[in-house]
Image (cartoon, rainbow, N blue to C red):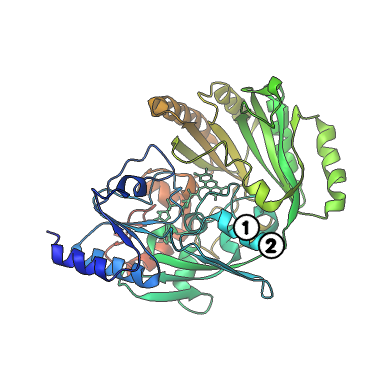
Amino acid sequence: MLGEVSIAAFRAGLRGELIEPGDSSYDQARKVYNGMIDRRPRFIVRCADVADVMSAVKFAREEGLLVAIRGGGHNAGGLGVCDDGLVIDLSEMNYVHVDPRKKTVLVGGGALWRDVDHATHAFGLAVPSGIISTTGVAGLTLGGGLGYLTRRYGLTIDNLLGVEMVLADGKLVAANAKENADLFWAVRGGGGNFGVVTSFLFKARPVHTVYGGPMLWPMEDAAEMMRWYRSFIAKASEDIYGFFAFHTVPPWAPFPEHLHNRKMCGIVWCYTGALKKAEKVFKAIRDFKTPGLDLVGFIPHPALQSLFDRVYPSGMQWYWKADFVSALPDEAIAEHIKHFEKTPSLQSTMHLYPINGAARRVKKNATAWWHRDATWAEVIVGVDPDPANKEKVSKWAKEYWSSLHPYSAGGAYINFMMEEGADRIRATYGKNYERLEKIKKRRDPTNFFRVNQNIATK
Ligand SMILES: Cc1cc2nc3c(=O)[nH]c(=O)nc-3n(C[C@H](O)[C@H](O)[C@H](O)COP(=O)(O)OP(=O)(O)OC[C@H]3O[C@@H](n4cnc5c(N)ncnc54)[C@H](O)[C@@H]3O)c2cc1C
């Protein structure tokens, strides 16, 4: 039984807010990005600083509470919130300090990527992240981080210099190449299994204005474009990034009216090479097949990052299915097209994110992130604003995924997975799993941090 005295003592020792059921902010505070998730924690603690995180861990341990850690709250399966237990919510710890001389960025454990993009852009810098600005820095980084700068500068974790984190015993430690190197290895891909990361130190890259945006073609051209893309991206120079996508054109500006609500295939580009060469580089692409819609041009990096924010506001119903993929044979292409033609909603989509280039040059065992020799991380998401369509979009995503799964390379990117069980997690980490297990056993022997893609020890 939780004692009123210990709750009162915990509350009194905090600088941040303790939210409980019945409080006016409770329902808003328990919401996460995926509207399909409806969990009711016993406490939500909005930590103001590291001291709050340390006392939250201590309180949960003493009271035997389940703990969820919330960074940006974007996780597919809603792993930033739990039923009954304590949510350690870091959203107030969202500071970003750029050191333009050292080209490093110190980021609080609850920041969003848009916070980082805003602060770094002023100095002509960027940290490799994803393809949307509203995701949390913490969850995305701890899971690996795939996005516009992956081919040029590697995964987000390949740009991570160190973290500070609160472990299951409540102590704060630094983890980097010199200190607690086991933890530094494990947090680069191992998710929230090892502790609450209170800050990240990143290497920033010289990225300011890029040449990018979406190019879309009609579905009649989808097979030809997918075939062209699979060989193009395998050989493209590392300053050219493009993820393949199926999308329905939104019925609003800047999209031309004649394309509104049309299903199309496309590539979303981000070129970070010399800008004066950009038009020439892309002429070859455009000459292959003139796009039905071409929104590619010079664009500030933060603007490219936030291009999809309006299509995907918080609170929609999301059902995620994912796989790593090494090859895209013609039969798989045919299945993709067949299933996307049946897409049930405007926002439902399929993306293939390339993993080659700089990300592939890092050894498979250099960090916990194993699948560096896969060519793409595939994600199929059924999305709809209306909870009444939850089953419909989930069924579509499951069927689509099942017919493509035979072409998968094994495992899936943990940040695109919902709750799929231990075997999938094992497959995802490949030969790195055993080492993760050992570190988990040493650093978190009671599996205190288990609301995540869990490295459960025997
Ligand atoms: C619209 C959308 C677009 C996306 N695009 C991309 C993309 O381009 N590239 C990409 O790589 N991923 C992408 N993702 C996936 C994203 O990386 C994951 O959803 C990720 O988990 C989000 O991190 P978060 O901090 O917002 O999540 P949360 O829900 O807050 O947390 C996710 C997990 O991380 C753990 N965690 C969170 N904060 C901490 C912390 N401070 N310390 C320790 N553990 C912590 C939690 O315990 C939980 O298990 C996208 C997701 C969405 C919804």
- Identify whether 425 is placed above or below 246: below
Quarter of the view holding residue 338? top right
**Pointer 1: residues within 10 angstroms few (<14), some, or many (20+)?**
some
The residue to which callout 2 is attached is 122
Q: What kind of residue is marked 1?
A: His
Instruction: State how far apart marks 2 and 1 are (Cα).
Output: 7 Å
Considering the numbered disc 2 on the image, is that residue within a helix, a strand or a loop? loop
Is the Cβ of the residue at disc 2 closer than 8 Å to that at disc 1?
yes
The C terminus lies in which quarter of the figure?
A: bottom left
Left or right of 38? Residue 214 is right
What residue is pinned by disc 1?
118
**Residue at disc 1, CB closer than 8 Å to ligand 1:** no
The answer to whether residue 229 is left or right of residue 379 is: right
Quarter of the view holding residue 359: bottom right
Label 2 Cα crowd, 10 Å radius (few <14 / some 14-19 / many 20+): few
Q: Residue at x 49, y 55 (%)?
A: 143
| In-image side of 320 versus 3 (left or right) | right
For image coordinates 59% across by 55% down, the residue present is: 129
Residue 15 image point, x, y percent: 34, 68
Reply above or below: 72 against 15.
above
Q: Quadrant of the N terminus?
A: bottom left
Residue 347 x, y percent position in the rendering:
54, 31
* Image x and y of residue 278, in percent: 83, 48
Asked if one can make out residue 266 in the rendered structure from this viewpoint, the answer is yes
Query: What is the residue that sits farthest to the front in this orientation?
Result: 24
